Image (cartoon, rainbow, N blue to C red):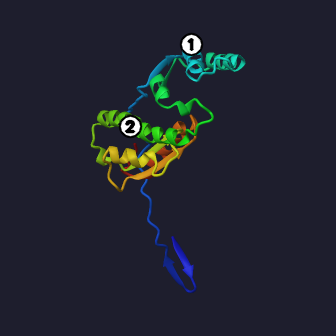
Amino acid sequence: MPITQGNSAVRENRPSRQHAEGPAAVLAIGTANPSGTIVPQEEFTDQFFRMSNSNHLTDLKGKLKRICNKTGIEKRHFHLSEEVLLAHPEFLDRELPSLDARINMVATAVPKLAESAALKAIAEWGRPATDITHLVFSTYSGCRAPSADLELATLLKLRPTVSRTILSLHGCYGGGRALQLAKELAENNRGARVL
């Protein structure tokens, strides 16, 4: 696009974007769940209140049970097991600080869980991880720097030039937004391979 400067025309030095040909497509899917505990939805409220020593909060327990019955969720996967809670009494005692222990646990668990899902997707895709050009990572659990996306890129041995984007603390909305962002990246960058 020419820009006029004084009496001379100067060509703007801006790289032209090369859009992909056609819409983005999902080429593979990988899933993973925490290995800690699987709880059927109908047992969740009782187990949660038992594990958190909160059975005395009967009104709150009844309210949570009503909410859980309306979610449509059949089972829940948890990293926290009774063994983990026994090893970390500070998680249940409000008088003890627990934020550092929780952050450290998440900093280890989230990238490993992401790696498990990513390896399945990469295997189904059938190309090497080094062909990935963009990484979009969403987590509700991570709040540490460097973040889990960098750890995942390292675990997968992605190229150091991979373009990384992380969506942190967005809740369930983050997954949908991550897919939308991946679509936008794939459609607006020719040759993009987005994980």
Residue 79 on image: x %, y %: 46, 29
Looking at the rendered structure, the kind of residue marked 2 is: Lys
Whether residue 193 is visible: no
- Judge whether 189 appears above or below 179 on screen: below
Nearest to the observer: residue 89 or residue 116: 89
- Residue 67 lies left or right of residue 91; in this view the side is right
Looking at the rendered structure, the kind of residue marked 1 is: Glu
Report how far apart the C-alphas of labels 1 and 2 lie in the structure.
29 Å
Residue farthest along the top direction in this orientation: 42
Q: Give the quarter of the figure containing the C terminus.
A: top left
Mark 2 is surrounded, within 10 Å at the Cα level, by few (under 14), some (14 to 19) or many (20 or more) other residues, namely: some
Q: Residue at x 40, y 29 (%)?
A: 32
Residue 4 in which image quadrant: bottom right
Mark 1 is surrounded, within 10 Å at the Cα level, by few (under 14), some (14 to 19) or many (20 or more) other residues, namely: some
Q: Residue at x 56, y 13 (%)?
A: 42
Residue 185 on image: x %, y %: 46, 49
Nearest to the observer: residue 23 or residue 168: 168
Numbered-mark total:
2
State if disc 2 and disc 1 touch (CB < 8 Å): no
* Label 1 element class: helix
Residue 73 on image: x %, y %: 55, 19
- Judge whether 72 appears above or below 195 on screen: above
- Residue position marked by numbered label 2 in the rendering: 112
* Label 2 element class: helix
Whether residue 73 is visible: yes
